[in-house]
């Protein structure tokens, strides 16, 4: 979400809200098809990689409501 796939970490709710507001609001529209599988796979890999650091990874998903790869 911070725009840096090599270092996607955001620290704290305030930073998350600021980055969301700066990068998404009014710049990106929601639309289908909505495919979560690639994102969830990448997030899982990230969580496994930072597991020893005792962090609490959080994934925020915004969708238009139509999920096309639910299984």
Image: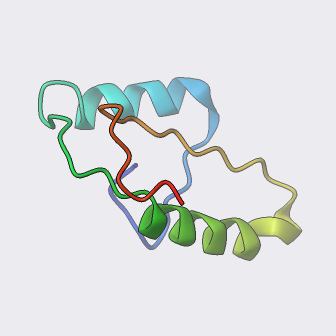
Q: Which residue occupies the foreground of this view, 58 or 61?
A: 61
Picture residue at 32% right of the left edge, 56% below the top: 3
Q: Position of residue 57 (x, y in %)?
A: 69, 50
Above or below 38: residue 22: above
In the image, taking residue 56 as reference, residue 7 lies left or right, namely left
- Write down the quadrant of residue 59 in the picture: top right
Q: Residue furthest front?
A: 71
Q: Quadrant of the C terminus?
A: bottom right
Above or below 1: residue 49: below
In the image, taking residue 17 as reference, residue 31 lies left or right, namely left
Picture residue at 83% right of the left edge, 64% below the top: 53
Above or below 39: residue 9: above
Q: Which residue occupies the foreground of this view, 24 or 34?
A: 34
Picture residue at 61% right of the left edge, 41% below the top: 11
Q: Position of residue 5 (x, y in %)?
A: 41, 68
Picture residue at 54% right of the left edge, 23% below the top: 14
- Write down the quadrant of residue 64 in the picture: top left
Q: How is the image coloured?
A: rainbow
In the image, taking residue 21 as reference, residue 70 lies left or right, namely right
Q: Position of residue 36 (x, y in %)?
A: 43, 57
Q: Which residue occupies the foreground of this view, 53 or 65?
A: 65
């Amino acid at each position: 979400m911070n725009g840096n796939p090599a270092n996607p970490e955001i620290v704290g709710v305030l930073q998350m809200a600021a980055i969301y507001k700066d990068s998404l609001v009014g710049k990106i529209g929601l639309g289908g098809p909505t495919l979560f599988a690639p994102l969830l796979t990448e997030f899982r890999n990230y969580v496994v990689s930072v597991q020893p650091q005792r962090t609490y990874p959080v994934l925020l998903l915004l969708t238009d409501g139509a999920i096309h790869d639910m299984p």
